Amino acid sequence: MKKSPLLSWLWVILCIASILTIVPLARSIQNFVTRWLGRSAFGYFVLLSVTLFLTFVVWLLFFRLKVRRISNYLCLAAVGFAYIYFTLKLWAHPEEAVHFLEYGLLSFLLFRALRNHFSDISIYSSALFLGALVGIFDEILQWITPGRYWDFRDVGLNALAVLLFQVALAFGLKPEGLTRLVPPRSLRFASILLSSNLILLGLCFSNTPKRVEAYSRIIPGLSFLEKEEIMHDFTIKKHNLPGLGLFFSRLNLEELRILDETRHEELAAILKEWADKPYEDFLRIYSAQKDPFVHEFRVRIFRRDQKLKEASKLPPGRKREQALLAAFRENLFLEKYCPLTLRLSGYAWSADFTNSLAQKVNPQASYRSPIGAGFWLFRKERYVWITILLIVIFLALINLLYASSIRRKNKKISQRRESNPRPADYESAALPTELHWL
């Protein structure tokens, strides 16, 4: 693996370039495949690819490498099950599962390239952090691409795909030649990569609508970013509503009512005008930054109608009940807080239809609307940066302490060697070659 480091990194670069190049073309590819093969073709392609890869690896281990340890095969089975499980979990949007293939391949190429520079088990962590960093840049590129959206969940899925492949390598394939002794240089490299991930994620958290508006004024060429979906907003309000569930909004409930009362004619006219136009174009023109009320209203209508359509295609069961519940509760929220805009825009359901749907859902069932939810681990921006700063300081201290510990051990080894000389061959065996990285 160390014969051609330049070629190894060239493959990594080509893989990353391919992933990023696909971002602006993804919608066209998705529409083409959906038209000719159906949207589920993406999911079946991922499942087939995972199955073929695992079959090949098992054949390679068992018949070519004569590996008989059951732990290897149990690990590969667990990783394969995880890939299949998350692919099926994404079946409503099967094209997203393709990320598992992209980042699984990237994970392997990163491992192979890093083997040219490191010979210890920190390679697995470094490959994970480097792959996760690419995944964040991938999502940032999606954020600035029309028709594509930023999602912290997708950042996690990209990192998960890299992680699963590293687990398969570490415990399934178990490549030889990696020592458990981690030199300070390796720990330092992994720590820098982890810190880079945290800082970049922190910048994404801080990329709030107000900040986008601020730097768009300074650099007018970036004004198009104001039309993109919000990356994160610390002003999101959480509304826990009895009989409805948990809802999120940039507006409080009183603001929703006032805007509905004062602007319903204007907003209904806008919604009617855009009824037959592309939904994605509407979201860009009437972004959450520009007009949070009409943006949120249209997104809730879209989710309501999509869930109702999804339920109509599902057989009786839990998934159908969940889809009906989502459609019913989103509509109930609009009826309660945006009634005038709902009726005048033509999106209102008839009383008979609403009542019939109410009979099909459990009134006691809990519901959490994903609209506007974002990432709720941090309520204030300063908490994000305090957490990142503490982790970075902790990593720096760990590196200093570890390097100091290794130096003390090396000093003791040198002192013992001087006081008790051994044959040359014994000395070379006593000092692990990995310490030569120091």
Image: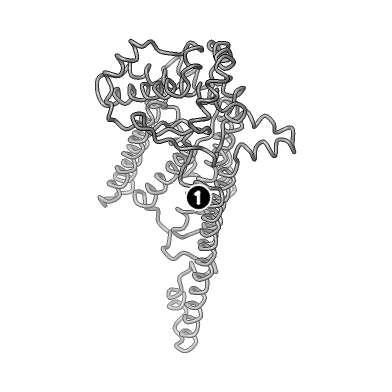
- In the displayed structure, 171 sits above or below 159; it is below
Say which residue label 1 marks.
129
**Position in image of residue 145 (x %, y %):** 60, 29
Q: Residues within 10 Å of mark 1 (few under 14, many from 20)?
A: many
Q: Residue at x 46, y 86 (%)?
A: 421
| Residue 215 seen | yes
**Position in image of residue 350 (x %, y %):** 38, 10
- Quarter of the image for residue 28 reads top right
Q: Residue at x 49, y 24 (%)?
A: 299
Name the amino acid type tagged 1: Phe
How many numbered circles are shown?
Answer: 1
Q: Judge from the rendering whether residue 108 lies leftward or rightward of residue 63; answer left or right.
A: right
**Position in image of residue 124 (x %, y %):** 45, 53
What is the quadrant of the C terminus in the image?
Answer: bottom right
- In the displayed structure, 71 sits above or below 36; it is below
| Residue 105 seen | no
Secondary element at tag 1? helix
Residue 110 or residue 315, whichever sits in front: 315
Residue 116 or residue 51, whichever sits in front: 51
- Quarter of the image for residue 58 reads top left
Colour logic: one colour
Q: Residue at x 51, y 55 (%)?
A: 387
Q: Judge from the rendering whether residue 50 lies leftward or rightward of residue 189; answer left or right.
A: left
- In the displayed structure, 29 sits above or below 346; it is below
| Residue furthest bottom as drawn | 419
**Position in image of residue 436 (x %, y %):** 53, 69
Residue 342 or residue 206, whichever sits in front: 342
